[in-house]
Amino acid sequence: MIDAPAPVSIRRAWIAVAGMFALNGALFGIWASRVPAIADRHGLDHGALGLLLLFLAGGAVCSFPLAGRAADRFGAAATTRVLALVYPLGLILLPLMPGPVSLAGALFVFGALHGAMDVAMNGWGAEVERRYRRPVMSSFHALFSLGAGLGAFSGYVAAGTEMSILAHFATTAAVATVPAVLLARVSWASPRTASAAGSVFALPSGALLLVGVVAFCASLGEGAMADWSAVFLRDVTGADESTAALGYAAFSAAMVAVRLMGDVAIRWLGVAATARAGGICAAIGAALAVASPGAGAVLAGFALMGVGYATIMPLAFSRAANDPAIPQGRAIASVATLAYGGMLLGPPVIGLLAGMTSLQVSFGLLVGLALVVAGLAGALRRPV
């Protein structure tokens, strides 16, 4: 039995979903901004930090099928609302851990909450987009990036004022709970079904395989920026902790600006040209960061990477949703598996490679992946 959405103002629904995206981004940005401080507290080198980040990735991957089943059974909106209230608790858990082993467990929980909310809120966003009858997903992703940037900026302020990690995370989590409660009041009823097919882990095939590769390459870069931008600035350029926290903020702010204008750019340039320009821009930004000795130039490179990656994921999901051979839900899930896989694998891959070589060499990998995005941009065109 399928339940129809309740008659609720579409504008209110957009605000609720946009707020959930912003909340999810903010909590992750808060964590990302204090990675150097947490690494220092536990005496972690690049390799050890990369291994620990695998637990964050593992928690998210394990949460995908559970979140998908919950969204099927209880509705994407209801699942999102519950997770929005629990997710801040996962953030507070991180600074309470006394050692690397317990931190690994906390990171698994934090990653699981982040990944589960990501799956659920994207489902809710797709429902709202269908009611709008025009693309709005890019605006939701823009709000995620805005939230991530604001979260990272809170790390800059906290580090500059020498606020402890626990005080920072507890304060921001408490503040985040207020909008979560308010947004949960929107009475949107998502479609529900007793079926809980494990399509979250489906892999793309045929023409969608190239779309999945593009999404994987772009999202790996996004994931790497989330957890390593601050460490890169501190360890490569010698920036202090407060300046290092601006790395992810610069990346996210640039991504927000471009995502807000993304629909206009696509109308002007077309899908393939927009994606190709994005891949080239991201490659230039990563190369600038690798080659520059100063923090200012590295920040500029990170901003260019944000500009380049901004439209890739919305275009990939849009292409999946319009595939003529595969049902929409299955197509989106298959591309999402590679996309989120790239985002989650990015941090540990960069860490492990940095442990064997250097951070500059590991970030050089992002140059090559961005060029792959540019080369496969035509795969994102919608079939005629």
Image (cartoon, helix red, strand yellow):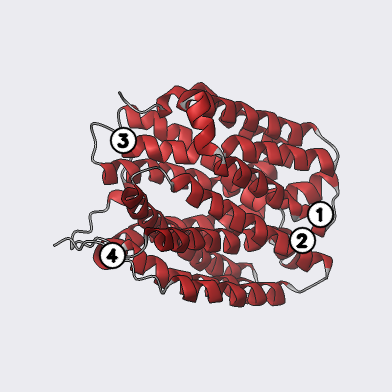
Which residue lies under the disc numbered 1? 243
* Residue 294 as seen in the image, left or right of residue 105: right
Please name the residue that numbered disc 3 is placed on. Answer: 322
Q: Which residue is mark 4?
A: 7
Find the distance from the CA under tag 3 to the CA under tag 4: 26 Å
Please tell me which of labels 2 and 4 falls first in the chain: 4
Q: CA distance from mark 2 to mark 3?
A: 41 Å
Ranked by sequence position, the earlier of labels 2 and 1 is 2
**Mark 4: which amino acid?**
Pro
Q: Residues within 10 Å of mark 3 (few under 14, many from 20)?
A: some
Q: Is residue 343 above or below residue 159?
A: above
Q: Nearer the viewer, mark 3 or mark 4?
A: 4
* Marked residue nearer the N-terminal end (3 or 4): 4
The crowding category of the residue bearing disc 4, from other C-alpha atoms within 10 Å (few below 14, some 14 to 19, many at least 20), is: few
Report, in whole angstroms, how far the alpha carbon at label 4 lies from the one at label 1. Answer: 47 Å
Q: Residue at x 50, y 72 (%)?
A: 180
Disc on the earlier residue, 3 or 1: 1
Give me the residue at 32% from left, 49% from top. Answer: 130
Mark 2 in CB contact with mark 3 (< 8 angstroms)? no
Mark closer to the chain start, 2 or 3: 2
Disc 3 to disc 1, C-alpha distance: 42 Å
Residue highlighted by disc 2: 156
Distance from disc 2 to disc 1, alpha carbons, whole Å, reads 7 Å
**Local secondary structure at mark 3:** loop
